[in-house]
Image: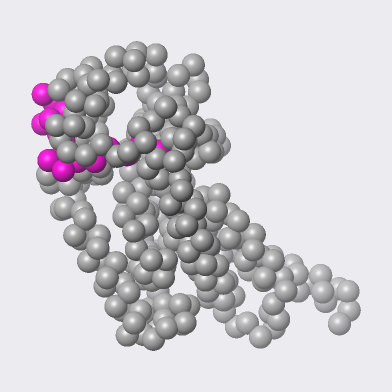
Amino acid sequence: MHAGDDADSLDRATRDFLAARRQLFGVAYRVLGSAVEAEDILQETWLRWQNTDRAAVHEPVAFLTTITARLAINHAQSARVRRESYVGPWLPEPVDTRHDPQLGAERAEALELAVLLLLERLNPVERAAYVLREAFDYPYKQVADILETSEGNARQLVSRARKHLAAERGERVSPAEHRRLLEVFLAAAQTGDLAVLEDVLAADVVSYADGGGIRGASRIPVVGRPHVSRYLVAFAPRFWPPARTRWVEANGRPAVLVSVDESPLALLSVDVSAEGIDRIMWVMNPEKLLPYAAALSD
């Protein structure tokens, strides 16, 4: 093979990889809940793609997706061990979805922070099966091939994930109602209005503050309407007065970026059902928050 042939082959490999890159990131991010880890997976996928006999690959996107999904599953299995020693509640790393609302997928499934948090409780193979089927609309036969299992087992994996999400999340509300409740919640949290907070919170609401041991965030989730509402009222006088808020989008949902002296302090997002606000998520870990805030100015 001549040097020119090598260059042409690498050029084609680069074009194929770049054409699939957004989808590959979408798969890895949904399986891992981390943009940083997803980028690491893509780097490894690219290295393997360069060293592959590409002449034998008839469908580059399918091949690259298979590599990415398997690498993400392996990484998620080791990440689970690391997250067991994580200081305080772990929340997914938020991403700005303004320019790509579906994050490389056919549908914007398995993208909301609350869904990624719930999927974290499944094993990585179940998560991958759900992501490939529900977000990327892969046929069960292809899901099975990627996961090296039978088509019947692929269906069972997706079914278990669906049942888990259905059991953990109540009936969803419209985007307009989601935004309205977040607005009401924000105003009540800022003023310490106990009555309004109790009105918008679901009975079994949980508040998660992910500070990664760096911020002065609560190291355990706060559970239940009475505890969460009183907790919010208690820290309102010292948390909100110096803060500035900005409405943003994170993972396809409205969110609020809280800053002090132009430095991001927290990203506030909520999960809402017909019962009210079910989950309050405060991403405060700078390693997760700062890359998201920086992306807003791109």
- Please state the extent of the stretch shown in magenta in the rendering: 195-210
Q: Residue at x 49, y 40 (%)?
A: 288
Q: Is residue 28 visible from the viewing direction of this image?
A: no
Is residue 126 covered in magenta? no
**Left or right of 274, for residue 5:** right
Counting from the top left corner in percent of width and height, residue 126 is at 37, 69
Quarter holding the C terminus? Answer: top right
Residue 245, horizontal then vertical, whole percent? 37, 23
Within the image, what quadrant is residue 105 found in?
Answer: bottom left
Residue 7 vertical position relative to residue 242 in the rendered view, above or below: below
Q: Is residue 36 above or below residue 292?
A: below
In the displayed orientation, state which residue is furthest to the front: 85
Residue at image x 40%, y 55%? 102
| Residue 84 appears in the figure | yes
Residue 290 picture location, percent across and down: 52, 34
Looking at the image, residue 180 sits to the left or right of residue 73; the answer is: left
**For the view shown, which residue lies furthest in the right direction?**
2
